[in-house]
């Protein structure tokens, strides 16, 4: 069975509570459940992890980055600051799609640059939970 890593970065554990006008009212558990349902129906296994700690995110990328069919990664605020995460994405074999619930380019100036985007296979943002679903479907339907 092909495995896909869903990797949530900092503050995503607060989905549904933190700025629902920006990030929506869906909780992380509800998002994960929706992703699990979609994957299960298509015969894929998800590995889901969330951390507020940069080094733990690097560890997850390294642990699964040579065996996962694909990685759906929301680096949260580390998007704009983490050379370590960029280096981890560059070092692994599994393709990574960077996702964001909101659209960083339409927000504050400090949120516009992504240190990871160029190291990723692709990027999807601004669609709320659909950003994750679109990335997941890409790995399930488009990537051989």
Image: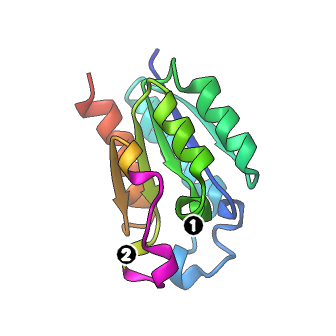
Does residue 72 lie above or below 3 as drawn?
A: below
67 vs 54, left or right, is left
Q: Which mark is residue 120?
A: none
Frontmost residue, 35 versus 91: 91
**Residue 113 on the magenta span:** yes
Where does the image place residue 3, in percent across and percent down from the top left?
Answer: 49, 23
**The stretch drawn in magenta includes residue 109:** yes
Q: Dot 1 corresponds to which residue? A: 26
Q: Position of residue 78 (x, y in %)?
A: 61, 59
Total labels: the figure holds: 2
Residue appearing at x 49%, y 23% in the figure: 68
Q: Residues in magenta?
A: 106-117
- How packed is label 1: few (under 14 Cα within 10 Å), some, or many (20 or more)? some
Of circles 2 and 1, the one toward us is 2
In space, the residues marked 2 and 1 are separated at their CA atoms by 22 Å
Rendered location of residue 64, percent (x, y): 58, 25
Give the crowd class for mark 2: few <14, some 14-19, many >=20 residues within 10 Å: some
Q: Secondary structure at mark 2?
A: helix
- Residue at image position (26%, 32%) is 141
* Residue beneath the point at 50% across and 27% down: 92
Residue to which mark 2 is pinned: 105
In which image quadrant can residue 59 be found? Answer: top right
Q: Classify residue 47 by image quadrant.
A: top right
Circle 1 — which element? Answer: loop
Image coordinates of residue 60 in percent, x first then y, are 65, 34
Q: Nearer the viewer, residue 60 or 141?
A: 60
Q: Residue at x 74, y 41 (%)?
A: 56
């Amino acid at each position: 069975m092909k495995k896909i890593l869903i990797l949530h970065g900092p503050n995503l554990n607060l989905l549904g509570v933190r700025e629902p006008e920006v990030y929506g009212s869906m909780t992380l558990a509800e998002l994960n459940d929706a992703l699990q349902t979609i994957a299960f129906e298509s015969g894929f296994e998800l590995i889901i992890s969330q951390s507020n700690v940069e080094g733990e995110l690097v560890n997850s990328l390294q642990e699964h980055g040579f065996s996962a069919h694909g990685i759906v990664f929301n680096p949260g605020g580390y998007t704009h600051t983490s050379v370590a995460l960029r280096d981890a994405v560059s070092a692994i074999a599994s393709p990574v799609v960077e996702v964001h619930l909101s659209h960083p380019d339409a927000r504050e100036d400090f949120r516009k640059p992504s240190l990871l985007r160029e190291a990723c296979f692709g990027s999807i943002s601004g669609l709320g939970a659909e950003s994750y679903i679109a990335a997941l479907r890409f790995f399930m339907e488009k990537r051989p």
